[in-house]
Amino acid sequence: MKKIASIILASVALFATSAKAEYKFNFVMHSDTNNAFWAAVHKGFKDACAQINADCQMLTLSGDGDQQEQLQNLESSIAQGVDGIVTTITNPTIFDAAVDEALAAGIPVITANTDDPEGAAGSNRLAYVGQDLEAAGYELTANLSEMFPDGDIHVLIGVADMNQSWAYTRGNGIARFMEDYKAANPDRKVTYEKIESGLDLSTVGNRVAAYVQANPNTTAYLDVGFWEAGAAQAVRNLGYGPGEILLAGFDLVDVVFEEMDKGYVQLTVDQQPYYQGYMSVHQLYLMNKYGLSALDINTGKAMIGPSDVETIRSFKGMSVR
Amino acid sequence: MSKNFSLRSLLVRPEVATFLMFLAIMIGFYIANERFLDARNIRIVMGITPEYIIVAIGIAILMISGEFDLSVGSVFALVPMTIVQMVHQGIPPWFAIFLGLMIGIIVGFVNGFITLRFGIPSFIATLGMLYIARSLTTVATAGFPPPFPHILPNELFVYQFELFRASLYWALLVAVVLGVMLHRSNVGNWIYATGGDQNAASSMGIKTGNVKMFCFILCGFLAGFAGMIQTFRLEAPLPSQGYLLELESIAAAVIGGVSLFGGIGTVFGAVIGAILIRFLESGIIMARIDAEWFRAGLGSLIIIAVVFNTYISRRATRIGQNKAED
């Protein structure tokens, strides 16, 4: 028994940090480790930490989007007494008290990737490093609309998880453009519908396939994540040719490029996730070291189409895009 | 000799081994990061733990009776979501709470009815309910998670005192009441007898079906009650809450010495098991283990806990046997 107890104690003690880093930073995110998008954020986070010799920890979830667990991770980070926290804010209210508690304890908090839906008005976080989610949804749809065929238009909006602010905020941007498009085309029948589409390729594929079969007049499907790639596989299996249903979404992941090669996905938005991990750490570092203040950084909403794929692939091996 | 026997009788109790394990973990993580035992961290962990204690007690009692419930995580989300939606529909808060908790009871009853009436494993019946109740939660959100109605009496359940929340006292109340029921009443004896050997229990005149039904209903009720407390604490009903809770609460019960085969276990063990898991989780984060290793660390420590537990009780049994041979 003594032996086992000492092994346990020793292994736990091993977890203690060995090197003495000047600063400790935590990144509290809202996804599990299986989500391909986050690899570039994590890479940016790690690269920045290595450059400044900081002790960094990225806290993922057991279940994608489990906000209670994310809140717990945020609170644990405060209890750790780290020197700065980067977090996403996926719910308009539940993180507010913890953010305030961190700030009161002298720990700077900035958001990355997903901000409070009301921005600075909804949370006391010091800055946001990421995409303007609503605007990106609007722009994506505006760009895709240039490919809309003549006649009636029916658009399906896949809001991955209605409970997560990043998802419904982008969805709202898409819907706002559709309202504008409807107003600009009074002589055509323009309709759209939102569904909760899911957080993995096969779920999204199944739901979109079912929807398209029930609504063969569907012109386009826009996903708030990168899961339009799952929809692409599904519509192909249903016998649709490339471009017969326009598909668009967010982010640069391999499955999306594959579907662009095949002609099924027309457009995706790059939010440059590497910046979200990288710039937020450097901000926290400079705030700690020189007392600089935090600043918002818009990491962009570049439209990426099939013709850009080759260029982007040349950077892909570096895991930054 | 009598001294050895009393040591044995103490160590042979699995929840005592779990408690020792708990102390070892606490000391280990304290060495890794001394802030682990800071008032702030204790306050955070003990703010969350009561919700898990309540579910683990329900699961433990059901497992002692020889059945499982995999739907607790979904009921944990469904009950508070319906309470919140009913309040939004204009139903008075206390009546909405009553109706919401009744849903937990009904789910428990349906789980028991399907299991007992059709003679299928509760593992399957409640696996089905896991999906049904989670789906009903999404239906209840009506497409968009509703805001938290502040007329609900959440302070009564989650008020933050200096170190602990009111929810801890509710959890202790549940533990004491059900501990007395399980260990000091006829109902408790029936539950142990039913889970230990159902045929023998039946032939002794125990209505084993009723006993199991009671445990299913209790488990559903406690899962819903605990979910309500979590929603009251977060002041937001989240459709995702309680994700993987079924596995965590079974893990808590097993770590606390409840047998997977029924008939063995205590309320105290389930309580310690639940606390241990929550501190493990916190300790792993506090020790700054990398994200990719987070679940591997948690999983390994769960296994270590149970192996340690089994080792201690076997060892203790052997000491007892040796002494008896002397």
Image (cartoon, rainbow, N blue to C red):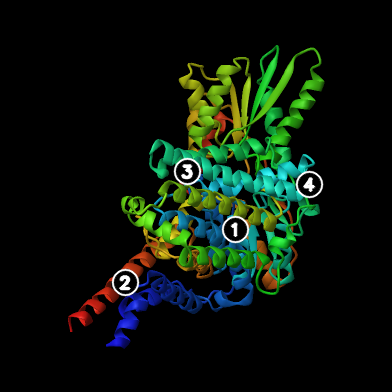
Indicate the amino acid at tag 1: Val
Q: Relative to the observer, which residue lies in front, B75 or B286?
A: B75
Residue tagged 4: B92
The CA span between labels 4 and 3 is: 30 Å
SS state under label 3: helix
Count neighbours of disc 1 (C-alpha within 10 A) and say few if under 14, some if 14 to 19, many if 20 or more: many
Q: Are marks 1 and 4 on the same chain?
A: no
| Residue in the image at 43% along x and 41% along y | B115
The CA span between labels 1 and 3 is: 40 Å
User: The N terminus of chain B appears in which quarter of the rendering?
Assistant: bottom left
Residue B190, how many percent across, how many down?
Answer: 42, 57
The CA span between labels 2 and 1 is: 40 Å
The CA span between labels 2 and 4 is: 51 Å
Residue tagged 3: B112
Tag nearer the camera, 2 or 4:
4
SS state under label 2: helix
User: The C terminus of chain B appears in which quarter of the rendering?
Assistant: bottom left
Q: Relative to the observer, which residue lies in front, A38 or B174?
A: B174
**Residue B313 numbered tag:** 2
Residue B183 visible from this viewpoint: yes
Pinpoint the chain carrying mark 3: B
The CA span between labels 1 and 4 is: 38 Å
Indicate the amino acid at tag 2: Ser
SS state under label 1: strand
Residue tagged 1: A28
Pinpoint the chain carrying mark 2: B
| Residue in the image at 43% along x and 37% along y | B117
SS state under label 4: loop
User: Considering only order in the chain, which callout, 4 or 2, is on the residue closer to the N terminus?
Assistant: 4
User: Considering only order in the chain, which callout, 3 or 4, is on the residue closer to the N terminus?
Assistant: 4
